[in-house]
Image (cartoon, coloured by chain):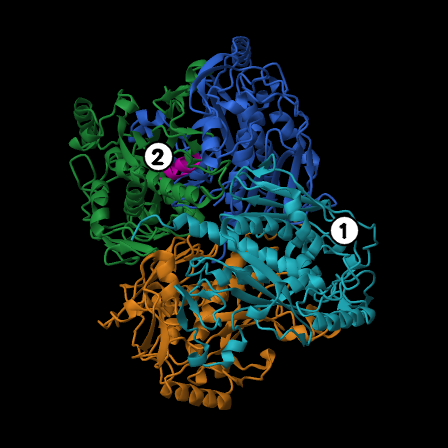
Chain colours: A orange, B cyan, C blue, D green
């Protein structure tokens, strides 16, 4: 199958390129009867858009979303919702040098070899600009989840290089996330992260880090084993984000250092509700949500665009040297936050509808 | 959609329970004309089956595979290949206690809440026994990849708790993997791992760890962005394996501690072939294989079955104490190795067919 | 994608060959909590099985179904239901002549050319024997529809060659269907049909005809335009049945002879219910069920197996003459009835779950 | 799953409404390297667009297509091709009466009941205007098929009510199709059809009919049994077209009047090629193309919009009378011709890529 669609009952199809006419996304399967206007979507795009601050790329895109179909008088009709974000900042930059070589750790080489052709301007389809569509669609998914289920979704920067947030997931104050440029819910740490990113920018270098995401008040029962486990679909969604290199849920890789006797999450009767004392499971057991907060992390590599002289090969396979120029995003982490949230919302909304399809059909 | 199928062009549907009649898998889309008998599949099942050694569960299953359809005179016909592994060791154990409570960090609670009913015996469908089907199907996928492409797939135990293999991926000697019970290609380390696992068994406790997997000689071009990136589909497949909690490719989480200037993989002309000097990308760029070895890791939690007294709740939501008994697998890592390989083969084979569908249609 | 699966939320995967070990079908997405044993399925297989009477093939198959997974204590668990029908009557017939040529209007030639190999015995995968799996799975779908919705499904022979039932769909007495060998709810006509079929058998020839099917008490709202319209998915399911050559719903081809002013189905207030005075629409409008009976017809060609001398080509493409021998089914119509019902149930059950996924989420 | 997508490897997602901003279609999986501009698509839209002649609706839409993504310098890049057709003729008509009632044999009632809301203007999503997207996407599919395979696709009006073309499929002169307004390759008959349609228009009434379609020079081997048979997917595609009520391939319903001995298509050696003397199979056997022309027919009902007084119910379920007004299409047949061709091209292109995925992997 073609790989530009995601989801089954709540399904998105993404299209568009970095320097083409724009980015679009078609949402199939949004339930009818929900109030929806551009104002429900725009704030999330504003969080993702470039040019927000001194620590993100200076490419300036207004990223204004337009609803092209699927609503009447501001209410969803159950038919496809087409969203369009027109590209504005298509500088007539000279891409002739870039057309002749493959930038290290970008997708230039693989796209050229796979398709026999590539859209050089801004990386074409391989650009992270396509995630504008993810964020727009994710805003719709989030609205479904919020209004129908009351689910709460929030992500934040957990680390920038070696600067790591030590706050436990259940102690995070989500209201602090947007109080600083880097979207880290610890003001002091955030300041140090900003300084580190600014230093990398000055050095023409780049940094990676980790985003942590929480989904709270998710009902018990979402996830379709044995393959479409909730964490499996989350992992796929996260690894499809540009520059991501890893995913872990609950205790993740660190959990491998524990023992079963301490890692097991003990169930207890919390005044009539079944809860677990710890949450190393990260809110899923056997691929199905267990009602505890879903907590996962995504690793993002240092962005490959750096303003340095680098060795590489040209399109004839010969060694060459090239020098990166212009705008660059020294650290994608702050802008990755709304993308991670959006992808999580898309996965969760799809699983919610799948859950709903089968639920309560036969009484037991 | 129902969640028991995986893949598009090379697709598997898994069925069966721990203590039911057996585990089965139906493979759709295996190309015609390949020699295939049970002997191509059985060795991989033998690597996964329980009761192999002192460090795995003592449940004794012969795990004999039977090809039920899809071949004639030992040659695939292009029609569905149905594989069946009959359950043998269905001890008439007393599950009446287990039926009344939810074991910590198992899927008892979530299955009960999701489906309103659960198969108590051995965990039913949530048991890792279903991975016997994955391994059987993976053997067929691997044969397609080996014969049609010459791909080489191998996994090994990278760590058991804090005992970690330090050998770099490109220095691994794959021939050492099967020389020890724990499937770690470092004999000394393997011995220490075995001791650690045996100690855990004696203590009635369990251990987790990390499996690393390599796919070598994969052609350039496999992977379908922007959602069905090769690493995204690998991540999904790995997170669908029982007890897995994390996935990372190439530099993964550790790569977030680097900088772009050192993390970028420099292309060079290797006597006519384009290769990279380092492989922090892990063999994929932009979601597409770049011809370098694909290297990824999967985190497995300490198995939740322990022979200890544990607190939990019963089916009425009341606090109770129960004591685990009987057979248990103190560390799933050795047996996870063939499962990781199988899932990797399934994903790769599916992407190979997808690649083939579009390739070389129009000359440029 | 591989083509042996059908459905999305209620999904089946079919496997097996005419003379292999058996026919199987895996059902994913059957809701949990429904009582289900072999006794719910067997009666439908008995209606389809060969050797029932003088007017069907004398191949004798018991066609005993076995539930291999997905239930516990006779209740569905929401996990895959694997059904198996072992082949019994695998006569060690000599297929060496058949291996050397392509029978006219069979799939011998196309399978050979497509796959480069074919299973000669009994037509292998191209045999109508695979529909035993459809019928078994359809029985499960029908039970879901009956118990959860109260839908009534019945089909019958509308015509055998030029002998055509003139009774209007709403005047059919479904209780008469099983009173005769040919499954036509008109006793006199049925007798003439039987005689015609017996005459064809004696002449070594074969006959075609039309099956009509009705789905009554289907709720308003099933069907997912603009592509997965209910009639579109029914059409696909029916054209996938062996020997079918046409599908029409409501007025069908005959409706093209009418005018809009007489063809339009006028809505009226039927004591509080909205109904239509006529039902040329056949129970669907805009791809969605409208609450009226769904009525459609399927055309089946005269079976290609005849006991005659026929010209054809051999595997080298040279003209040859061959003589059909042995058992043959002079008219598939009576046995097509349960297959049409089963495919209709599968489509309807899938659409019911899809409908349920989206329904009543936001109040308007 | 949501139902606005079709296809697997060559996949389209359709969006838009009759009186919204426009109609769009996203094509995933178009192979890279094919020349493609708006000029390849526009001629097909021109054939479908309203306002062409005295016998079609007078709604005047330029139906200008814009390629929004997926090409660079007029060459496909292998990434999604987004096509957009802006709505122009959105008359600010008064829909207040229509909002209060359900037009007979339209989708007003079913959409309202299914979604709880409907877009009244022009029928919203249920309008045949959505087929503009099908035709645009079909033009791209056709180009792939023409350039890569040399397939020839053409459809024509076979009948308008009782005026029926008697020419056998193999005797059709495709060059005559576009010589008359009604797209019937028989000039005299076409004139009579035009007169009949004009008479119906004057009477405020409407007519139905049959479109026949041929796919020539299709390679042997396309189609994926046992469910995704080529004719099954064609049937689904055709029954998804607005106003279609039936599909038949080869001999179809008329073939049920024949006997096996005359209906069987005898293979013969045609100077080294295997062909059949007759083509009652319609170019498919066992669900797979056999190299003979694929010939099928689609029945279209008389359009439900008529300029007459009609009884119906209002949104409260009460009997009312309403009078149709304004523009109407007295016979959709001429405009259905390019839609049928487009849907056929989409199905065939998808099956071609599926065929290609598996073909020639192992030599036999």
Q: Is residue B34 magenta?
A: no
Compare residues B322 and D147 and report the one nearer the observer: D147
Q: For numbered disc 2, what is the local secondary structure?
A: loop
Residue D273 image-quadrant placement: top left
On the image, the x and y values in percent for residue A85 come to 31, 66
Which chain is mark 2 on? D
The residue under label 1 is B61
Please indicate, yes or no, whether residue A344 appears anywhere in the rendered image.
yes
State which quarter of the image contains the C terminus of chain C.
bottom left
Residue C178 image-quadrant placement: top right
The residue under label 2 is D218
On the image, the x and y values in percent for residue B122 come to 75, 55
**Majority secondary structure of magenta residues:** helix
In the image, taking residue D146 as reference, residue C325 lies left or right, namely right
The magenta segment is: D232-242
The 10 Å Cα crowd at callout 2, few under 14, some 14 to 19, many 20 or more, is: many
Q: Is residue D241 magenta?
A: yes
């Amino acid at each position: 199958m073609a790989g530009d669609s995601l989801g089954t009952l709540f399904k998105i199809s993404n299209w568009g390129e970095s320097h083409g006419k724009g980015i679009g996304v078609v949402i199939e399967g949004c339930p009818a009867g929900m109030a929806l206007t551009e104002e429900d979507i725009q704030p999330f795009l504003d969080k993702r858009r470039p040019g927000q601050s001194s620590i993100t790329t200076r490419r300036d895109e207004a990223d204004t979303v337009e609803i092209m179909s699927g609503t009447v008088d501001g209410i969803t009709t159950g038919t496809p919702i087409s969203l369009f974000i027109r590209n504005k900042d298509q500088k007539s930059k000279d891409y002739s040098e870039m057309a002749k070589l493959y930038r290290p750790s970008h997708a230039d080489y693989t796209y050229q070899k796979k398709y026999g052709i590539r859209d050089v301007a801004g990386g074409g389809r391989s650009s992270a600009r396509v995630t504008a569509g993810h964020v727009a669609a994710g805003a719709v998914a989030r609205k479904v989840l919020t209004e129908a289920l009351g689910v709460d979704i929030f992500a934040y920067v957990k680390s920038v290089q070696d600067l790591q947030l030590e706050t436990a997931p259940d102690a995070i104050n989500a209201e602090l996330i947007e109080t600083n440029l880097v979207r880290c819910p610890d003001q002091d740490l955030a300041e140090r992260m900003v300084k580190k990113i600014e230093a990398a920018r000055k050095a023409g270098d780049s940094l990676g880090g980790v985003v942590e995401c929480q989904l709270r008040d998710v009902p018990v029962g979402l996830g379709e084993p044995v393959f479409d486990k909730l964490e499996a679909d989350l992992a796929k969604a996260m690894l499809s984000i540009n520059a991501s290199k890893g995913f872990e849920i609950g205790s993740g890789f660190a959990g491998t250092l524990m023992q079963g006797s301490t890692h097991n999450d003990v169930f207890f009767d919390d005044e009539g509700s079944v809860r677990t004392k710890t949450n190393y499971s990260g809110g899923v057991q056997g691929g199905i949500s267990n009602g505890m907060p879903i907590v996962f992390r995504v690793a993002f590599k240092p962005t490959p665009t750096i303003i340095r002289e680098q060795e590489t090969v040209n399109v004839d396979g010969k060694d060459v040297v090239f020098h990166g120029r212009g705008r660059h995003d020294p650290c994608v982490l702050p802008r990755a936050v709304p993308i991670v949230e959006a992808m999580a919302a898309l996965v969760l909304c799809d699983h919610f509808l799948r859950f709903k399809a089968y639920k309560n059909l036969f009484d037991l």
